[in-house]
């Protein structure tokens, strides 16, 4: 996390809270005091940051925008992202989204935060939020991270490009610039399918009213925008002919990002392109695909995928992970799958959610897999 | 119904050298039927796994809320400890809290029954329970050793817990004359017995295990037991000021109530009459079907009300628990009729009786097996024989499990 612009932490308060929690821990042992506090209100938990949804805006097609009020300050730089966890049908899921400070909120993280989540047809989390987000719903927030942030000092001219729900980090940057009174010229090109697909309309309108900010709405499937169709060099020529020596910050679908890169590459200015790419949370693979490698992150060992279980891969590579029954009943071998997809050899079920704990004795890697062993 | 009569079976290796089974003659389960039963139980498991969701999450959080409520109530009532009814109510609330924590929550969460929720605070790898036994040692001795090698004499250390003689295949020794006394002591001090279980004291006495092996375990005991002792016998009594002693006695009583209850439920799981035990030879290189049948024959249920099942952590459904140790335990009641139906279909016994009957039969065993085998009849309970796969083919058999790796 980049902390340059973040206000200092109140150490005395943090220390006092730690002492209190530890004293409570003596009484609540073997459970953390949070396991009592959260039953009164999930936001009372001290070891994690939870937030309650206070407002939901479904005016835009294909996305939902909601405002949350966190129990503790979530300090982030505009453009960075934060893991957000919710429960869907009993199962906890975590996805990463770019937060923005709510309009008018104190920009130290203690105020409300806005998220815009684009609907992915097969996305468990985005679909749940799209359909069920409502005031009162509690979400959990992780540590903000990411290096998709504006340069310090701010450059005199900036181009921001967003596509679809990729609006979130760049809009957050633009709002940050406006809040700190930045006077340099900023051009924001935003790509949406139709006017109905533009989220955060009020925020965009407010920014467009600033003298140094130009907001250009481009529609790929309707004709009433400032420009039409997918991104190409002509778009940049039209709104920012001086673009070649200006840093650009892009977030959007892979196609948009690669076209921006190509345009800058033609002028040999690739180093000016800063990108936040969407990483698909899950992907489909052929279950019989015994290719790729199995990486054991803690030990630094990498083995070729031979189709056997993760435990057998580890043992064949000379590791001795903790295990027991070797038949999936005792959970002794459970380890965190950092990335990749594994197949439950009993049921054939595939799973690829990052950070999930798996039983390595009954899970075989499918393609590249990294396990924390 | 699928049985053959005993003399027609050519393949009964483990009977040689052991006493003849008691009447009626055991039923023999063919390999085909064992495999078929295994597939049916697998299907039952998958069906339940596929249906896990909000309802199960809400259930466990409801139980946790109730447990934490009893805990806070019990601790609070100790401030009125000068008033005997309040003290008794406090002890009762605290006992219920500890029983729920250990059984329906702790034991089951540590089995990985709620791992699918991906909730860090309810993960089997990190959960701790309100007993002096460190959870990591419990997971080794219980989840792995006991659940994998259930009722295999010589491998499952839960047969008599290393201190009692609970099976006719355990060799008698004059030491075992004290069986009832050891059992009573274990009952009262159950959490401490559970804590020391993984030390394998009997193997140290036998000289097959060194004291040095116990040191890392003892460090875990110190870390865990210290916190438990400070909480129940120092911190909370001190917080009640002049009521230090009534609070301390109350907390100790709640721990003992939990000990007696947990001991009684757990001893009914595998020790009642009719429960079958197995030898290492016959269970080497088991197929998944054979493993299932061993779990079925080696476990006993306790019948009772829904509240009783919750208070027993659904270990009253020991048979279902041993077939599906990592399915949420509150699903066992709905699985039980279907398992029982399968048992009837294959002619297998389904051992289920009320609490009194099971407890009585366990204590009868404790007394009977205290005595030398020639004083009282001590024939093994064998009602079903398994037609096992020939060993040389076992490696190729589909679903071969549990390589010997201890």
Image: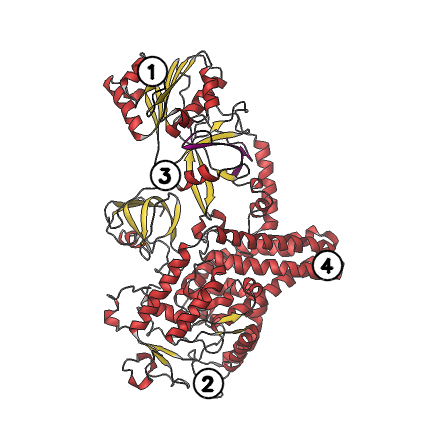
C-alpha separation, residue under disc 1 versus residue under disc 3 = 36 Å
Task: Identify residue for label 1.
Answer: A246
Circle 2 — which element? Answer: loop
Q: What distance separates the C-alpha of mark 2 from that of mark 4?
A: 50 Å
Which label sits on residue A121?
Answer: 3
| Closer mark to the observer between disc 2 and disc 4 | 4
Q: Nearer the viewer, mark 2 or mark 3?
A: 3
Helix, strand or loop at mark 1: loop
How many tags in the picture? 4
Residue assigned mark 2: B373
Most extreme residue toward the front is A223
> Can residue A295 be spotted in the picture?
yes
Using the image, name the chain to which the residue with label 3 belongs: A
Q: Residue at x 42, y 85 (%)?
A: B22
Q: Nearer the viewer, mark 1 or mark 2?
A: 1
- Could you give the CA–CA distance between mark 1 and mark 2, rounded to whole angstroms? 93 Å
Residue B86's disc number? 4
- Magenta part mainly helix, strand or loop? strand
Can you tell which quarter of the image residue B37 is in?
Answer: bottom left
State the CA–CA distance, disc 4 to disc 1: 76 Å
Query: Which quadrant does the N terminus of chain A fall into?
Result: top left
Q: Is residue A103 left or right of residue B140?
A: right
For the residues labelled 2 and 3, say whether their Cβ atoms are less than 8 Å apart. Answer: no
Mark 4: give few (<14), some (14-19) or many (20+) Cα within 10 Å. Answer: some
Tell which subunit mark 1 falls on: A
Looking at this rendering, what residue extends furthest in the right direction?
B83
Q: Residue at x 68, y 58 (%)?
A: B90
Range of magenta residues: A47-74
Q: How far apart in space, not on screen, are marks 2 and 3 (Cα)? A: 70 Å
Query: Are dots 3 and 4 on a single chain?
Result: no
């Amino acid at each position: 996390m980049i902390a340059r612009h973040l206000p200092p932490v109140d150490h005395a308060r943090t220390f006092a809270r730690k002492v209190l929690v530890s004293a409570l821990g003596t009484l609540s042992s073997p459970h953390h005091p949070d396991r009592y506090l959260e039953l009164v209100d999930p936001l009372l938990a001290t070891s994690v940051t939870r937030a309650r949804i206070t407002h939901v805006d479904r005016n835009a097609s294909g996305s939902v925008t909601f405002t949350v009020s966190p129990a503790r300050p979530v300090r982030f730089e505009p453009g960075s992202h934060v893991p957000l966890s919710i429960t869907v049908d009993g199962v906890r899921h975590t996805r990463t989204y770019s937060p923005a400070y709510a309009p008018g909120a104190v920009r130290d993280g203690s105020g409300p935060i806005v998220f815009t989540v684009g609907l992915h047809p097969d996305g468990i989390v985005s679909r749940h939020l799209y359909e069920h987000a409502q005031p009162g719903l509690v979400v959990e927030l992780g540590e903000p991270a990411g290096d998709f942030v504006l340069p310090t000092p701010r450059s005199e001219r900036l181009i921001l490009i967003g596509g679809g729900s990729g609006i979130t980090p760049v809009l957050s940057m633009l709002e940050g610039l406006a809040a700190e009174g930045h006077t340099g010229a900023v051009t924001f090109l935003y790509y949406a399918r139709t006017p109905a697909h533009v989220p955060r309309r009020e925020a965009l309108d407010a920014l467009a009213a600033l003298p140094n900010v130009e907001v250009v709405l481009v529609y790929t499937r309707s004709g009433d925008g400032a420009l039409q169709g997918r991104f190409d060099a002509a778009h940049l020529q039209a709104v920012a002919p001086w673009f070649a020596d200006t840093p650009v910050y892009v977030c959007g679908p892979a196609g948009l990002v690669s076209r921006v890169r190509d345009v800058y590459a033609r002028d040999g200015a690739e180093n000016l392109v800063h990108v936040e790419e969407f990483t698909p949370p899950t992907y489909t693979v052929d279950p019989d695909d015994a290719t790729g490698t199995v990486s054991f992150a803690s030990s630094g060992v990498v083995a070729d995928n031979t189709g056997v279980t993760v435990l057998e891969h580890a043992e064949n590579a000379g590791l001795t992970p903790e295990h027991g029954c070797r038949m999936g009943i005792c959970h002794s071998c459970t380890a965190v799958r950092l990335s990749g997809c594994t197949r439950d050899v009993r049921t054939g079920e595939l799973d690829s959610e990052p950070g999930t704990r798996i039983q390595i004795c009954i899970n075989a890697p499918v393609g590249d897999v990294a396990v924390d062993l | 119904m699928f049985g053959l009569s005993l003399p027609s079976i050519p393949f009964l290796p483990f009977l040689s050298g052991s006493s003849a089974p008691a009447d009626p003659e055991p039923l023999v389960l063919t390999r085909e039927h064992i495999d078929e039963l295994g597939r049916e139980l697998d299907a039952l498991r998958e069906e339940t796994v596929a249906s896990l969701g909000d309802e199960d999450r809400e259930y466990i959080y409801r139980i946790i809320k109730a447990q934490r409520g009893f805990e806070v109530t019990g601790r609070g009532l100790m401030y009125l400890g000068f008033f005997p009814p309040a003290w008794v109510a406090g002890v009762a609330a605290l006992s219920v809290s500890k029983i729920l924590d250990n059984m329906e929550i702790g034991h089951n969460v540590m089995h990985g029954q709620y791992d699918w929720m991906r909730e860090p605070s309810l993960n089997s790898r990190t959960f701790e329970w309100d007993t002096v036994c460190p959870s990591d040692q419990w997971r080794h001795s219980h989840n792995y050793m006991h659940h994998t090698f259930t009722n295999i004499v010589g491998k499952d250390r839960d047969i008599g817990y290393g201190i009692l003689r609970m099976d006719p295949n355990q060799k008698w020794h004059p030491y075992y004359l004290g069986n009832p006394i050891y059992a009573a002591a274990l009952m009262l001090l159950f959490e401490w017995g559970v804590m020391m279980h993984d030390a394998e004291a009997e193997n140290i006495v036998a000289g097959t295990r060194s004291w040095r092996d116990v040191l890392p375990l003892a460090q875990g005991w110190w870390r865990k037991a210290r916190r438990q002792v400070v909480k129940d016998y120092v911190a909370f009594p001190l917080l009640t000021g002049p009521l230090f002693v009534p609070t301390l006695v109350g907390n100790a009583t709640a721990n003992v109530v939990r000990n007696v209850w947990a001991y009684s439920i757990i001893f009914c799981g595998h020790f009642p009459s009719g429960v079958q035990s197995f030898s290492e030879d016959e269970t080497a290189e088991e197929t998944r079907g054979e493993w299932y049948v061993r779990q079925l024959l080696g476990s006993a249920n306790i019948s009772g009300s829904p509240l009783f099942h919750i208070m027993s952590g659904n270990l009253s459904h020991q048979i279902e628990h041993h077939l599906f140790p990592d399915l949420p335990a509150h699903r066992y009641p709905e699985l039980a009729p279907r398992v029982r139906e399968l048992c009837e279909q294959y002619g297998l016994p389904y051992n289920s009786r009320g609490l009194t009957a099971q407890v009585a039969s366990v204590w009868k065993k404790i007394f009977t097996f205290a005595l030398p085998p020639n004083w009282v009849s001590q024939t093994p309970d064998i009602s079903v024989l398994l037609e096992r796969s020939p060993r040389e083919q076992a490696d190729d058999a589909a679903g071969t499990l549990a390589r010997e790796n201890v």
